[in-house]
């Protein structure tokens, strides 16, 4: 079995276990976070979430809102979809026969589900190399390790984020999710490197169709306003899958930019925590 070693430990989050657990705890308790440590008391059924994937000091508190909201659950499988920023490997890729390593230990890929999703989908292929440098999936895992136990992951990275691919991926992962106790995580940041006020305006316009779970309108706003959300295909795939599983609406738990968090508002990145119920 291959070990997928961390690509961004020591950069996006600490590479030392004690510092990492302390930072994640701080993110949960942060004023932009849920303000509490998990687990949450059980509430309404959540089918999937949208989480940002920047360095924890910037987006960690916002991401922890999504993770806190599902912390009463005990998923056996997390399907994590994100953009392939490097554009390496396959157009749409999962992987199998592998463990993902972080400073908090190793998490196994669900090879059975990886095999099955490749057969269900017209676009998903199995390719280890596609995942070697990508951070959008990796940064989710330590927060999951701190919050849940006894789970496996099904990682899916997207170079092609077209509406057609999102439709294919969304329907395929929904079939997997119907068979196992699953939580879907769509990994994306929103506007990149714009002034704070403009980022807020752009992102709230794009978040509106996400909450309505309207994929056509989502792509329409994305293209017309040229919103620089990096994981738009991951967001769309998550909407499609959650809709297929019975979700009827999205709920925005928290939106903030790196400027809101750090105070430097000249050139910011936007982050949203959204759940589908």
Image: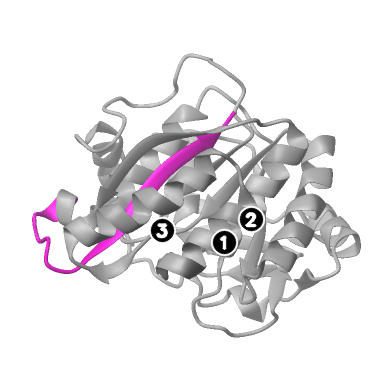
**Residue most extreme to the left:** 263
Q: Residue at x 32, y 68 (%)?
A: 192
Q: Which secondary structure, mark 2? A: helix
Which of pointers 2 and 3 indicates the residue nearer the eye?
A: 2
User: Are discs 2 and 1 less than 8 Å apart at CB?
Assistant: yes
For the question of whether residue 106 can be seen, the reply is: no
Q: Residue at x 81, y 54 (%)?
A: 172
Residues at marks 2 and 3, CA–CA distance in whole angstroms: 24 Å
Lateral position of residue 237 relative to residue 220, left or right: right
Across and down, in percent, residue 188 comes to: 47, 58
Q: Quadrant of residue 201?
A: bottom left
Q: Which secondary structure, mark 1? A: helix
The part of the chain drawn in magenta is 261-277
Camera-side residue: 164 or 242? Answer: 164
Q: Residue at x 65, y 70 (%)?
A: 162
Residue holding disc 2: 216
Camera-side residue: 254 or 181? Answer: 254
Residue holding disc 3: 53
Lateral position of residue 203 relative to residue 4, left or right: left
Point out the image quarter for the C terminus: top right
User: Are discs 3 and 1 less than 8 Å apart at CB?
Assistant: no
Above or below residue 277? Residue 23 is below
Residue holding disc 1: 219
Across and down, in percent, residue 255 comes to: 32, 43
**Residue most extreme to the right:** 119
Q: Quadrant of residue 24?
A: top left
Residues at marks 3 and 1, CA–CA distance in whole angstroms: 21 Å
């Amino acid at each position: 079995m291959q070990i997928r070693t961390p690509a961004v430990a020591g950069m996006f989050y600490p590479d030392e276990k004690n510092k990492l657990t302390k930072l994640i705890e701080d993110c949960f308790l942060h004023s932009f976070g849920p303000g509490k440590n998990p687990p949450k008391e059980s509430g309404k059924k959540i089918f999937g979430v949208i989480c940002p994937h920047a360095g924890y000091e910037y987006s960690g508190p916002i991401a922890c809102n999504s993770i806190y909201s599902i912390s009463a659950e005990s998923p056996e499988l997390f399907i994590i979809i994100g953009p392939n920023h490097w554009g390496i490997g396959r157009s749409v890729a999962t992987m199998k026969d592998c463990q993902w390593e972080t400073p908090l230990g190793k998490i196994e890929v669900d090879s059975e589900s990886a095999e099955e999703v490749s057969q269900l989908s017209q676009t998903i292929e199995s390719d280890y190399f596609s995942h070697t440098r990508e951070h959008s999936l990796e940064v989710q895992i330590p927060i999951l390790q701190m919050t849940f136990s006894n789970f496996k992951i099904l990682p899916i990275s997207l170079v092609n984020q077209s509406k057609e691919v999102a439709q294919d991926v969304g329907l395929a992962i929904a079939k997997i999710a119907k068979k196992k106790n699953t939580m879907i995580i769509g990994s994306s940041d929103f506007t990149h490197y714009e002034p704070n006020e403009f980022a807020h305006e752009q992102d709230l316009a794009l978040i509106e169709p996400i909450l309505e779970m309207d994929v056509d309108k989502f792509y329409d706003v994305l293209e017309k306003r040229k919103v620089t959300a990096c994981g738009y295909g991951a967001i769309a795939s998550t909407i499609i899958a959650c809709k297929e599983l019975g979700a009827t609406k999205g709920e925005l738990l928290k939106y903030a930019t790196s400027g809101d968090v750090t105070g430097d508002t000249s050139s910011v990145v936007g982050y949203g925590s959204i759940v589908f119920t």
